[in-house]
Amino acid sequence: MRILVLGGTAWLGRRTAELARAAHDVTCLARGESGAAPDGVRLLRADRDAADAYAELAGEWDAVIEVSWQPAHVRGALAALGDRVAHWVYVSSVSAYADPGSGDERHEPWRGEGLAGDEDYGPAKVACEDAVLARGSGAAMVVRPGLIGGYGDPSDRLGYWPARFARAQDGEQVLVPDPARSFQVIDVDDLAAFLVQAAATAVPGTVDAVGDTHTLRGLLQVCAEVTGTTPVPVVASDDELLAHEVRPWAGPDSLPLWIPTSAGVELLRDNAAARAAGLVVRPLAETVAASLRWEREQGLDRQRRSGLSAATEARVLSDRPRS
């Protein structure tokens, strides 16, 4: 099969191209600023804002795997390649849902001009979905992942936890949110394998490609097992964390995977349809171990995109009321 990955030099796109090359003729179209394409994969360097971005893509394609969240890029690719592609696989996001934890209602599609801003991510994904699905119900699959983790994760979200445990001395206090809270994470390799399968089998439809549901307590136990350390988790309430301006979910000085109850958001979706379509989800411990390998390579003490700094964690712990 001839498979075209629109992207293919950054994290998920690169891993997808890497897995696809084992059985298929794979080409990536990207600016190449995020790195090189995998060995054995042809890279065409192009700026998707340019009018001639797709000029070098000759012939017909069995499948396209598209990861962009910019409606202008998706529509441009569809206009240039649509009648030469048998099946289109679009990687959307659970952020397309107006309330990701409740119901299937999506955001209103973004209708702006040019490139969407970060604040329009969910509505922009909806606009991209609509453009792809306009091909017809049998000619496209929309895949909506949630949190992605594993080796190579540039967001530092899941990786914060095994990295924090790996840094800890036995008996050291580690600040944690309510351990009963639930979360989902899908390993990047599981998602990439599913995208390749969806392209190869031309399965249509829309699915939530999310991992199984776990509690933070379970994650902490896995982190202790994977790192071989025995820190002491100290639970802080939502009010305590918010009072110390700890950010939820992601970003600098955040407590990753934590969402305050007051936010009224629960990022949990049903992965049954994706499993029925071929998604295979590995045990959480394997994803945590892969995250830890990446964290060690990047440096456990580096400045992070997501996670508490040592100074902020120490401040919150020292300000807690003593029993």
Image (cartoon, helix red, strand yellow):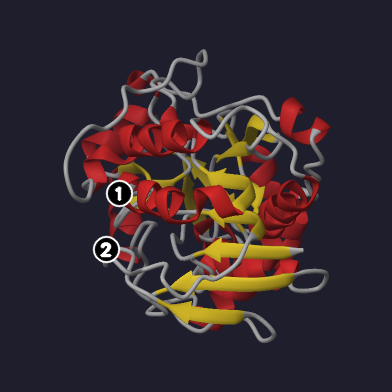
Q: Amino acid at mark 2?
A: Asp
**Horizontal relation, residue 221 to residue 42: left or right:** right
Q: Which residue was labeled with disc 2? A: 49
Q: Nearer the viewer, residue 205 or 81?
A: 81
What residue do we see at 38% from left, 58% from top?
A: 306
Dot 1 lies on which element?
A: helix
User: In the rendered view of the protein, which quadrant contains the N terminus?
Assistant: bottom right
What residue do we see at 36% from left, 29% from top?
A: 238
In percent of width and height, residue 129 lies at: 46, 35
Task: Give the numbered dot on residue 11.
Answer: none
Q: Is residue 280 visible?
A: yes
What residue do we see at 35% from left, 55% from top?
A: 313
Q: Which residue was labeled with disc 1? A: 72
In percent of width and height, residue 82 lies at: 51, 48
Above/below status of 284 relative to 102: below
Q: Are marks 2 and 1 in contact (CB under 8 Å)?
A: yes
Dot 2 lies on which element?
A: loop
In percent of width and height, residue 64 lies at: 59, 55
Above/below status of 298 relative to 256: below
In percent of width and height, residue 85 lies at: 60, 52
Q: Residues within 10 Å of mark 1 (few under 14, many from 20)?
A: many
**Horizontal relation, residue 246 to residue 138: left or right:** left
Q: Toward which corner of the image does residue 264 lie, by quadrant?
A: top left
Q: Nearer the viewer, residue 14 or 233?
A: 14
Q: Is residue 168 visible?
A: no
Q: Earlier in the sequence, mark 2 or mark 1?
A: 2
Above/below status of 58 relative to 264: below
